Amino acid sequence: MRFKALDGFDVTETSLQVQSALLSFVDLLRPGQPVIYSRLFSTLNNVSGVDTLIMATPIGDLFPANSLQLFTPPDPNFSYPLAKNGAGSPSFSVVDNANVSPYTAQLPVFPVQAWSFTLFLGIKQLTVVSGIYPGFAQVVGPGLSADINNFPSTVNLLTGQATLYVIGAPGDLSMTLIPINGYATDKFVNIYVGYSGDTSITKRREIRSAIEAWGNGVAAGGSIYGQKVPGIIGSASNITAVIKAISGVSSVNRVALDTPGNTSAVINTVETELLRIGDVIINNSID
């Protein structure tokens, strides 16, 4: 879950209050008892200091498999081992100058958001960011192909299905949850796009919707990237890449962040601020 703290409330202290409310809610459950989403949401949303609340999971009622099963609170320190299943033959990647092998894995918790979990390959933490395709998170980092166009490692946010393109044998795959993600302030960033290809109003609306969906996956304290920034792994998923992935776009001429004349490829922020997509101006038009 992700929440915004009310003005005057400390994010860390409010996070502890939310955690306490969550633990109390789950502790009252009996074996075989379902989790009623509306009650859970109301319990967390009514915590003192919470302004707005978004649930990554669950998004509906949860029912145990049998009368003996008992739901337990999410534990950010628990590591879920994930089985990697081979999904095809290795292919040579020019970008990586190595063979990459496709694997699939199923997350035990879904649906998810890009800001609600982390993945590890061996002892190395991978970077999970908003994906260039709506409904997916992008996974980048050591042991994975850097060619996100031909060998993109992704997680389907709705089904929890992960597809990874692995180099060599970097180790076992595991996942940890980020149960509570809080922030104090919003900052809206306007996006200015110039592109060629299909410039119809329908296509412009599709591009705008894709950019907004990408922005919804930015974590509190996370950055918004207009283009890939050398040396920053997470910038592989950026607004230019989102636009280029849309059919009918032949080229992207510019992506400016915040102001039309801004040449910086990134907008950074502080840990307790959430960057959000503001107006998206495409070829000088707001449709």
Image (tube, grey):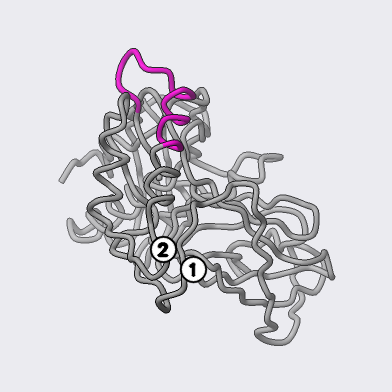
Left or right? Give the position of 178 relative to 87.
left
127 lies above or below 71: above
Instruction: Identify the secondary structure beneath mark 1.
Output: loop
Which residue is tagged 1? 160
Task: Please provide percent x and percent y for residue 160.
Answer: 49, 68
Between 65 and 102, the residue placed more toward the observer is 65
Task: Report the magenta residues as a range.
Answer: 5-20
Q: Amino acid at mark 1?
A: Gly
Q: Quadrant location of the N terminus?
A: top left
Between 158 and 182, the residue placed more toward the observer is 182
286 lies above or below 213: above
Residues under numbered marks 1 and 2 in contact, where contact means CB atoms less than 8 Å apart: yes
Please identify the dominant SS of the magenta region.
Answer: helix
Which residue is tagged 2? 111
246 lies above or below 92: above
Determine crowd level at label 2: few under 14, some 14-19, many 20+ residues with C-alpha closer than 10 A: some
**Image quarter of residue 82:** bottom right
97 inside magenta stretch: no
Instruction: Identify the secondary structure beneath mark 2.
Output: loop
Left or right? Give the position of 233 relative to 281.
right
Task: Please provide percent x and percent y for residue 157.
Answer: 44, 63
**Image quarter of residue 87:** bottom right
